[in-house]
Structure formats: structure tokens, C-alpha cells
Image: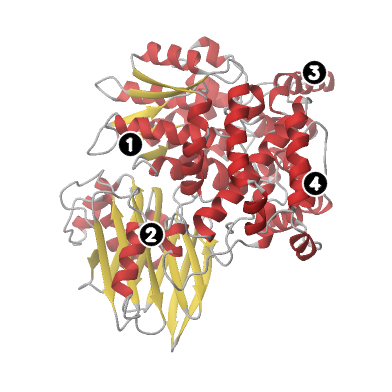
């Protein structure tokens, strides 16, 4: 686990290239505090940097790595699993290795398979590889986007980095918000491949960017090498029994967790009160000889706290549990600012701050690696938004589902009641539709509906210049049009809901301020075993009514894990994991108000030029006086996004955190 950065120019490098590359790499210190590596080739215009976090091959795993008489240059952020078997097979074919690093297998695989080398890699990774013979640079991001990778292209120059801040310290990379992206930040949902910043792009999950020198120019091609690819309804195999799918879940998860326990340093587990992380801990505890170290967040609000269930799980498997108790003082102030800095985007809830606090504790306890439960809801239909779509549309065409319409209606009513706490942010209180989403998906997925409601409140708060610039821009239509319709046509409703969520919210939220960015902020690698692509390719074959069976979400996973889970957890409905919003307690209100006074005062607003000062001030007053629980949840989310933009303005656009 590390950080990578660099740039390639059609011409020669600038005279200050060494200094520029060092600054770009050192901006990633938190991702790789164990040393920097550089490669510069002035006449070829190439500069590659690597910040290292030592987890595998502690002694000789420094990067960049070289092959083919130094004509192939490689930097990697992430982990390749099953690398020992792959390396051994490659040695039998005559390939030589100079390190014991997992990263090095990418070089002989590239020599053997060319650009298809990525199909033979298993894990979470971002890669930059230069091929001198082909005059080609390849940037690759893993299949789900667990590891971040950003790029900027201008004037025949390509810049890249694990984090946006590493690009921004190069003097040729602009620092400005993208106007359309501002609207997306406020409504939580980004367009795949975009960031908050003008002309800085996110390499999409499952994609590679192929840059080749043609004459005096650099030609860029974006190639998709993997997708979830749910089977079309007429092609789905409905003949296999529930027991078959349960066993397949067990087999693939055991293998995925086993691979993720491979490290030359101790490996722990994140542990909440959900079946996802509890399943990871249960499997890891069975595999490891010594007790597993588990890390749990506890909130000072019983409605949002799951620590008591996590403790029951830890006690059940004999894990050593470290509990992090978080209050208002921990979730706001400087910790809030630091989380924004590392996320490089806004967040709707302080769960990201809580996750930053937890990774800090993990690091303090001497751990650099944890196995996590992210991705389970995406693969097995766990979120209430997905369940709402399944109950609304999904039983219409499934023969023999065993559920009457009255039963399905009762499940819907119960689901709405038990998830009332989250309406306004995770669920909309009423059905909302959008014509372009309806056209492309056949319905408007429930996951985007609350953010469509937020958008209606957010747009009028913008500065008049922005409102005029964006008057014809439809962010929901743009999101819908970004989806590959070949992956949606003739698919089941639940497949479509899971797919569209995974292409947007998984990458830009769960794996950003809920994953890599806040973990690596404290030099700590998280490994989400559910997002192993072998697990995913198995899960996509599971019929929808085994993923959500009646009123039971993730039914097939529950059945697969029931003998290692506490009964209370096996029987419990999915509970959204989030921090208590600010309006739930006076101390949190006060802590949030301090940030509002610092970043939303008239001078700060006028300087940024994003919001209309009068309209925003009225909105904040309305929020502070609001008593409606659903309205408060929605406005609390929007306040966080507004604050986030103002903080990012200070940190990145003004450059206060870039040491410029």
C-alpha cells in the first residue's frame, strides 16, 4: 500500500522536474511514510514517483520497479493477492525477479500478456507502467475503485496521482472547482470519472488509460477491461438450489479473506454491528492461530450505536477488541477539517470523520492492515434503498417467489418504519422520479431519490453567476447518461439498482471518505474482501430473490455465515451505519456552529464566490430552527456539503494546505 504520482510530457522535462516530482510525491507522505522512490528520464519527458508503506517485502520492495533492461518502469499502489503462486509459475517459465514484492509480478505479466496483464491480477490496486519500446504509459485502476487514481491532461502533458493534492502542487496543474461538479458535491452524487475540480478526472474503476506517443503528440485512450456484467434475465440460471449458492458464497469468501490476511505485518479487522464486518472477523478468527485484533467505533447516541452487538461478536470468537468512543469533540473541529483534506470532496455525514478517527487508533495500536466489510451490501442487496426497489418492482416477474402481494406490501411497510431514522438522506420520504433515469433504467433507483430532493434545496443557494451558468445543466440526467446501457438492458430491477449504486456511490462515497482516503490518511491499509472480483463474479450469478428474500436482505449471505454470527445479528434487519447528525444533540449543534461561523461568514462566502450570502444565511437560520426530523436529516446533510466546499476552497483552491 503506497502512493503513486508522476507525469509524462510529449517533449522534454522542465528544468525544475526533479523538484516538482519530489513535491508531488511528498504530498503523499501519509500514504507512504517509509520512503520515496523517483524515476526521471528528461529526454523522454517522464517523471514517476512512489511513496512507500511497507507491508510486504519490507527489505527489498522499494519502487519504482524495472524490467526488460530498465525499459519497463512500474509503480503500484495496493496489493496483488495470490502473488506467490503467480510468481512461482512465472519463474518456471524463465522470468526473473529481483524482489519478494507482490507488485513485481505485474512486470512479467505485462511482458507475457501485453495490455491484458491486468486480467491476471487479483486485488485492489492503482498502477502506472511505462513501456519505452512501445512509447506507452498505462494507468490502471482496480475493478471496483478501491484504490484511487486521478489524472489531468493539458498541452500534450499527462499528470497522475493517488490523490488530487499531489497533482495540484505541480505548477502546471490548475486549481479551481468545476462548476457542474459543485452541484454534484451538494447533491452527494458524482458523475463517474469526475472530481470536484476543473479538468481533474478520476480514472473509472475497471478502466485503464492508455497513453501513447505518436510523433510529437500523446494520444489517450480510455479502455474498460472489467464490469459487473449481471446476466440478462433470459440467460440467468434459475435451476441451481439455494444450498448451491450458499456453499459458493462460503467457498469464495473463505478464499478472499485468506488472501487478505497475507502480510509481513499484523492484520486486524474493522468491526461494526453489521453482518459484513462480523463475517470478516468470524472467518479471520478461524484462520489465524492467535486472537484477531478488532477495532470498533462507538457513538454517544444509542439510536446510532452498534458497539454492543460488535462486542458480542468479538466475545464469541475470542477477538481482542479496541473500542473507540466518539463524541461531538471528536467529530467536528480540526478532525472535520482533516477528513475533508484527505477526502478531497464533501461528505454528508461525519461517519467519514469517525472512520478517520478509527484508522488513527489502528495506527497507534501498531497495525497497518485491516480486513473490512465494505462491498457486501453492493453484492448481496443489503441497503434499504435496494430493498425498497426490490419490494416495489422486483417481485412482479419472479415466478414461484412464494410471496403474495399482501406479504410484499407488509414487508414494504415494515421496511419504511424501521428505516424512518434515515429518511432525508438515505431514503426519500416519498417516491421521486426523473425522466432520463426512467428511460435508461426503467425506473428511478431509490438510492438517488433523496439526493434529488436535496438538489432542489441546494441549487437556489448558489451565487447568481453559477445559477446562470448551470441553468440548463441537469445533474441527474448526466449521471443516468454515464451508465453503460449494455449493462442495464434486460437486467432485473435489483441488478440495475446494485449496478448503478456501485458505479456512483460505492466509488465516490463508500470507498472514498468511508474507505481508502481516511484509512491511508493514517498510513493504514484497508482490505475489503467482499470486493474481490472472484466473489463479485460469483455473487452476480445469485438470483435476486436469494439476495433479498421476502423481508430479508442479504439472505444468502446470512445463511452462509449463520454458524459464525450471533443469533441477534443473524436475525437483525440491515441498519445503516452512520454518525449521529448534528441536530441530535446540543454539543454537536454547537460544534457544527463553530465551523459555520468560521467558513460560512460573509467574508469567506464572498471570497469563494460559490454561494449567495443572503440566501445561504436564511437557509442556515431555517435549518437551525427546523423541528421536522426528515427535513433536519436532509438539511444536516446539505450543511455538511456546503461546509465541505468552503473548507476545500480554503485548502486546495487557495492552496492553504498545499504548502505553496
Horizontal and vertical percent for residue 46? 34, 75
The numbered dot on residue 410 is 3
Q: Which residue is mark 2?
A: 127
Q: Which residue is mark 1?
A: 369
Q: CA distance from mark 2 to mark 4?
A: 39 Å
Give the mark nearer the N terminus: 1 vs 2: 2
Residue bearing the label numbered 4: 456
**Among numbered discs 1 and 4, the one appearing first in the sequence:** 1
User: The residue tagged with tag 2: helix, strand or loop?
Assistant: strand
Which type of secondary structure does the marked residue at label 4 adopt?
A: helix
Task: Report the quarter where the C terminus lies.
Answer: bottom left
Say whether disc 2 or disc 4 marks the residue closer to the N-terminus.
Answer: 2
In percent of width and height, residue 7 lies at 39, 71
Front residue of 641 and 5? 641
Q: Is residue 150 left or right of residue 181?
A: left
Where 601 sits versus 446, above or below? below
The residue closer to the viewer here, 332 or 113, is 332
Q: Could you tell me which secondary element the residue under label 3 belongs to? A: helix
Q: Marks 1/2: CA distance?
A: 20 Å
Looking at the rendered structure, the secondary structure element under dot 1 is strand
Residue at mark 1 to residue at mark 4: CA–CA distance: 41 Å
Near mark 3 (Cα within 10 A), the count class, few <14, some 14-19 or many ≥20, is some
Mark 2, other Cα within 10 Å: few <14 / some 14–19 / many ≥20? many
Amino acid at each position: 500500500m503506497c502512493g503513486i504520482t508522476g507525469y509524462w510530457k510529449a517533449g522534454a522535462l522542465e528544468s525544475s522536474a526533479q523538484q516538482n516530482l519530489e513535491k508531488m510525491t511528498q504530498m503523499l507522505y501519509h500514504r507512504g511514510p517509509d520512503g520515496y522512490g523517483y524515476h526521471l528520464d528528461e529526454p523522454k519527458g517522464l517523471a514517476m514517483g512512489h511513496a512507500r508503506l511497507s507491508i510486504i517485502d519490507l527489505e527489498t520492495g522499494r519502487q519504482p520497479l524495472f524490467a526488460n533492461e530498465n525499459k519497463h518502469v512500474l509503480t503500484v499502489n495496493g496489493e496483488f493477492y495470490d502473488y506467490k503462486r503467480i510468481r512461482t509459475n512465472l519463474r518456471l517459465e524463465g522470468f526473473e525477479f529481483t524482489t519478494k514484492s507482490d507488485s513485481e509480478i505485474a512486470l512479467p505479466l505485462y511482458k507475457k500478456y501485453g495490455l491484458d496483464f491486468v486480467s491476471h491480477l487479483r486485488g485492489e490496486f492503482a498502477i502506472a507502467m511505462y513501456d519505452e519500446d512501445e512509447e506507452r504509459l498505462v494507468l490502471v485502476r482496480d475493478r471496483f475503485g478501491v484504490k484511487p487514481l486521478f489524472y489531468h491532461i493539458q498541452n500534450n502533458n499527462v499528470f497522475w496521482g493517488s490523490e488530487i493534492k499531489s497533482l495540484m502542487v505541480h505548477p502546471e496543474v490548475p486549481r479551481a472547482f468545476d462548476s457542474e461538479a459543485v452541484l454534484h458535491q451538494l447533491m452527494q452524487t458524482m458523475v463517474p470519472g469526475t472530481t470536484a475540480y476543473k479538468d481533474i478526472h478520476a480514472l473509472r474503476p475497471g478502466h485503464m488509460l492508455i497513453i501513447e506517443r505518436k510523433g510529437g503528440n500523446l494520444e489517450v485512450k480510455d479502455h474498460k477491461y472489467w464490469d459487473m456484467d449481471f446476466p440478462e434475465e433470459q440467460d440467468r440460471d434459475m435451476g441451481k438450489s439455494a444450498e448451491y449458492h450458499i456453499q459458493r458464497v462460503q467457498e469464495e469468501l473463505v478464499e478472499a479473506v485468506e488472501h487478505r490476511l497475507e502480510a509481513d505485518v499484523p492484520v486486524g479487522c474493522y468491526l461494526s454491528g453489521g453482518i459484513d464486518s462480523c463475517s470478516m472477523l468470524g472467518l479471520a478468527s478461524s484462520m489465524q492461530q492467535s486472537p484477531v485484533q478488532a477495532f470498533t467505533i462507538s457513538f454517544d447516541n444509542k439510536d446510532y450505536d452498534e458497539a454492543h452487538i460488535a462486542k458480542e461478536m468479538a466475545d464469541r470468537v475470542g477477538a481482542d477488541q479496541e473500542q473507540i468512543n466518539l463524541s461531538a469533540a471528536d467529530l467536528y473541529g480540526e478532525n472535520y477539517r482533516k477528513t475533508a483534506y484527505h477526502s478531497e470532496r464533501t461528505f454528508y455525514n461525519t461517519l467519514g470523520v469517525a472512520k478517520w478517527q478509527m484508522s488513527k487508533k489502528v495506527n497507534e495500536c501498531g497495525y497497518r492492515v485491516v480486513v473490512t466489510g465494505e462491498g457486501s451490501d453492493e453484492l448481496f442487496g443489503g441497503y434499504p434503498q435496494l430493498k425498497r426497489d426490490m419490494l416495489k418492482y422486483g417481485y412482479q416477474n419472479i415466478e414461484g417467489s412464494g410471496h403474495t402481494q399482501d406479504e410484499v406490501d407488509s414487508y414494504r411497510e415494515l421496511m419504511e418504519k424501521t428505516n424512518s431514522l434515515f429518511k432525508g438522506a438515505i431514503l426519500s420520504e416519498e417516491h421521486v422520479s426523473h425522466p432520463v433515469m426512467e428511460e435508461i433504467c426503467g425506473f428511478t433507483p431509490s438510492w438517488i431519490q433523496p439526493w434529488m430532493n436535496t438538489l432542489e434545496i441546494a441549487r437556489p443557494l448558489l451565487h447568481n453567476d453559477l445559477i446562470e451558468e448551470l441553468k440548463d445543466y441537469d445533474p441527474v440526467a448526466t449521471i443516468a447518461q454515464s451508465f453503460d446501457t449494455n449493462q442495464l438492458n434486460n437486467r432485473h430491477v435489483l441488478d440495475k439498482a446494485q449496478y448503478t449504486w456501485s458505479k456512483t456511490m460505492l466509488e465516490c462515497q463508500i470507498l472514498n471518505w468511508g474507505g481508502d482516503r481516511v484509512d491511508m490518511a493514517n498510513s493504514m491499509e484497508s482490505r475489503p474482501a467482499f470486493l474481490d472480483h472472484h466473489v463479485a463474479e460469483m455473487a452476480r450469478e445469485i438470483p435476486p430473490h436469494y439476495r433479498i428474500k421476502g423481508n430479508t436482505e442479504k439472505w444468502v449471505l446470512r445463511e452462509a455465515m449463520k454458524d459464525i454470527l450471533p443469533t441477534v445479528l443473524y436475525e437483525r434487519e440491515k441498519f445503516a451505519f452512520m454518525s449521529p447528525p448534528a441536530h441530535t444533540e446540543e454539543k454537536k449543534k454547537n460544534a457544527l456552529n463553530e465551523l459555520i461561523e468560521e467558513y460560512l461568514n460573509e467574508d469567506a462566502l464572498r471570497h469563494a464566490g460559490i454561494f449567495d450570502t443572503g440566501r445561504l444565511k436564511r437557509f442556515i437560520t431555517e435549518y437551525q430552527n427546523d423541528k421536522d426530523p426528515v427535513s433536519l436529516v436532509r438539511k444536516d446533510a446539505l450543511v455538511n456539503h456546503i461546509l465541505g466546499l468552503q473548507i476545500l476552497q480554503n485548502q486546495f483552491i487557495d492552496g492553504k494546505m498545499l504548502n505553496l
